[in-house]
Image (tube, rainbow, N blue to C red):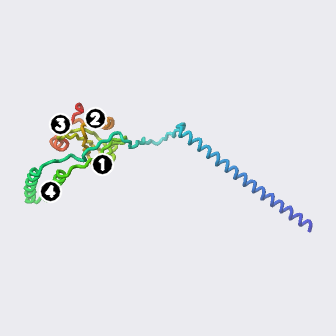
């Protein structure tokens, strides 16, 4: 009986030692994990400090990447959104009479699509002539030209040039896009030099030797590079 009690006592002691050893081992592992977390946290803090102080730079990658350019405003101006068409009521009635005669002629020839196009054009001229254009903002930024709620980045632009039509200066930006092929931005004479200096660093100024009648009617008189 006494021998059995001693045996049970030894087994119980062994169990206690095992449990105690496992507890100590667990505590030691937790302490090691805690030290690791503190070391990682300290290393992150040191690296963060070096990055802020610009002592650490990102490693260069073998993959070619483009430099990020922020849309920072360089110059801004306000102007009417379109060239104003002005005519009196007498002129409009003359245009209307001529157009109606031509439409009747097209009706005889059964050219209905062309009739619809001419009537639409007449309506546009009437609306443009009787409503003043609203004032909009145009911007030249680090990324390109910001107009009509869209940024046309430098790689989208082909060339630019200035013209003058009835005293109104116009900036024509020709694009590489299918649409729009060109942007017409009105400006004041006082803004012309600043706009030219910013654009000529990125876009070619178009050299027009001779303007067609359509270009003269649409854009006005071309201003040569030497006269800017």
- Report the quarter where the C terminus lies: top left
Mark 4 or mark 1: which comes first in sequence?
4
Question: Quadrant location of residue 158?
Answer: top left
x and y percentages locating residue 100 in the rendered image: 9, 56
Q: Residues within 10 Å of mark 2 (few under 14, many from 20)?
A: few
Q: Nearer the viewer, mark 4 or mark 1?
A: 1
* Horizontal side, residue 217 vs residue 17: left or right: left
Q: Secondary structure at mark 2?
A: helix
- Provide the residue designation for mark 4: 119
Gap between marks 4 and 1 measured at Cα: 27 Å
Mark 4 or mark 3: which comes first in sequence?
4
Q: Nearer the viewer, mark 3 or mark 1?
A: 1
- Provide the residue designation for mark 3: 210
Callout 4–callout 1 Cβ contact below 8 Å = no
Taking the spot 44% from the left edge, 41% from the top edge, the residue there is: 64
Mark 2 or mark 4: which comes first in sequence?
4
Gap between marks 2 and 4 measured at Cα: 41 Å
Q: Please tell me whether residue 49 is drawn above or below residue 10 in the rendered image.
A: above
Q: Secondary structure at mark 3?
A: loop
Taking the spot 34% from the left edge, 46% from the top edge, the residue there is: 151
Q: Secondary structure at mark 1?
A: loop
- Provide the residue designation for mark 2: 193
x and y percentages locating residue 99 in the rendered image: 10, 54
* Horizontal side, residue 129 vs residue 102: left or right: right
Q: Residue furthest bottom?
A: 1
- Provide the residue designation for mark 1: 148
- Report the quarter where the N terminus lies: bottom right
Q: Residue furthest right?
A: 2
Mark 1 or mark 2: which comes first in sequence?
1
């Amino acid at each position: 009986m006494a021998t059995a009690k001693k045996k049970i006592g030894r087994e119980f002691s062994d169990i206690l030692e095992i449990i105690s050893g496992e507890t100590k081992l667990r505590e030691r592992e937790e302490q090691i994990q805690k030290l690791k977390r503190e070391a990682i946290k300290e290393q992150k803090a040191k690296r963060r400090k070096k990055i802020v102080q610009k002592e650490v730079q990102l490693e260069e990658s073998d993959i070619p990447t483009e430099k990020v350019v922020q849309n920072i405003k360089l110059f801004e101006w306000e102007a009417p959104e379109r060239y104003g068409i002005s005519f009196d009521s007498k002129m409009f009635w003359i245009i209307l009479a001529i157009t109606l005669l031509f439409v009747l002629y097209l009706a005889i020839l059964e050219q209905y699509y062309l009739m619809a196009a001419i009537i639409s054009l007449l309506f546009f001229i009437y609306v443009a002539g009787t409503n003043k254009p609203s004032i909009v903002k145009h911007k030249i930024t680090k990324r390109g030209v910001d107009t009509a709620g869209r940024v046309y980045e430098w790689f989208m632009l082909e060339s630019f040039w200035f013209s003058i039509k009835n005293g109104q200066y116009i900036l024509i930006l020709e694009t590489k896009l299918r649409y729009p092929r060109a942007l017409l931005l009105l400006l004041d004479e006082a803004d012309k030099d600043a706009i030219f200096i910013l654009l000529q660093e990125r876009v070619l100024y178009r050299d027009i030797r001779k303007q067609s009648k359509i270009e003269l009617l649409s854009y006005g008189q071309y201003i040569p590079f030497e006269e800017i």
